[in-house]
Image (cartoon, rainbow, N blue to C red):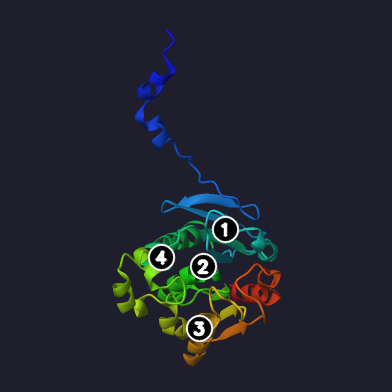
Amino acid sequence: MTLPLFLLPALLPASLSAAEAPRPATPVKELPLPGEVFSVAGRTAFVIPGKARGDDKAKPWVWHAPTLPNLPGAAERWMFEKFVDAGIAIAGIDVGESYGSPAGRLPYSALYAELTSVRGYSPKPVLLGRSRGGLMLLSWACENPDKVAGFAGIYPVCNLASYPGIAKAAPAYELTPEELAGHLAEHNPVDRLAALAAAGVPLFCIHGDSDQVVSLEANSGLLNTRYTALGGRMQLIVPPGQGHNMWPGFFQCEELVSFVKERVKP
């Protein structure tokens, strides 16, 4: 007997209903270079392996952020190829629009444990933050200075009050804007640099002087002023006339690649 089509959904198991369709065992993500996509702490993560180095030392890696459904993308391909050719892997994990919040920092620690304890990668990656990825990575780095070989930023957010602003960030921190403002120094990277400076972690940033989204003065400029005042080392490149854009010079920066290669040495 053939059942009417309208009866079939009612007879399907709940696990096969449209609202609860089976999820693929492995998350799907497009990467700018061949790599592995996997799940860590319920989040989509990836690693693009570096070319074999021919030694038994821990594998060097760059930790990239933000990792979002469309990032990293084609703009990162040039520098990723430089890293891979030098035997340096690239990895990241999607923590959503967490704005460096404690909830967003937890999966970062899970990714770090997966790569270092399970997959044999170096205990000191170089962190590479583009735009709001800088806020994510610097927030984690300030709590884990002994696990960071260096930080490189492409117009990175370093100051939560500048971007996205306290009101917009507050829900990610599970606080009201007033509460976040009152506890800003406990979360804001530019207010938490002392441990990184004491650990001797070098910083590198390239940031245009015409950035209207993530201003140079309130982010990389302020980071440079405060970090060097603490005795830290930072290199800041300021391309004149460049804003928060896809100018190739940001993503094909030889100085940035050289900084990463130097810092990931065992």
Find the distance from the CA under tag 2 to the CA under tag 3. Answer: 15 Å
Q: Residue at x 41, y 63 (%)?
A: 104
Find the distance from the CA under tag 1 to the CA under tag 3. Answer: 25 Å
Q: Amino acid at mark 2?
A: Gly
Q: Secondary structure at mark 1?
A: loop
Residue 77, quarter of the rendered image: bottom right
Q: Earlier in the sequence, mark 1 or mark 3?
A: 1
- x then y, percent, for residue 220: 54, 81
Q: Earlier in the sequence, mark 2 or mark 1?
A: 1
Find the distance from the CA under tag 2 to the CA under tag 4. Answer: 12 Å
Find the distance from the CA under tag 1 to the CA under tag 4. Answer: 18 Å
Q: Specify the label residue 105 is tagged with.
A: 4
Q: Residues within 10 Å of mark 1 (few under 14, many from 20)?
A: some
Q: Earlier in the sequence, mark 3 or mark 4?
A: 4
Front residue of this view, candidates 221 and 27: 221
Find the distance from the CA under tag 3 to the CA under tag 4. Answer: 20 Å
Q: Residues within 10 Å of mark 3 (few under 14, many from 20)?
A: many
> Which quadrant, please, contains the C terminus?
bottom right
Nearer the observer: mark 2 or 4; the answer is 2
- Residue assigned mark 1: 71
- Residue assigned mark 3: 223
Q: Specify the label residue 133 is tagged with.
A: 2
Front residue of this view, candidates 111 and 64: 64
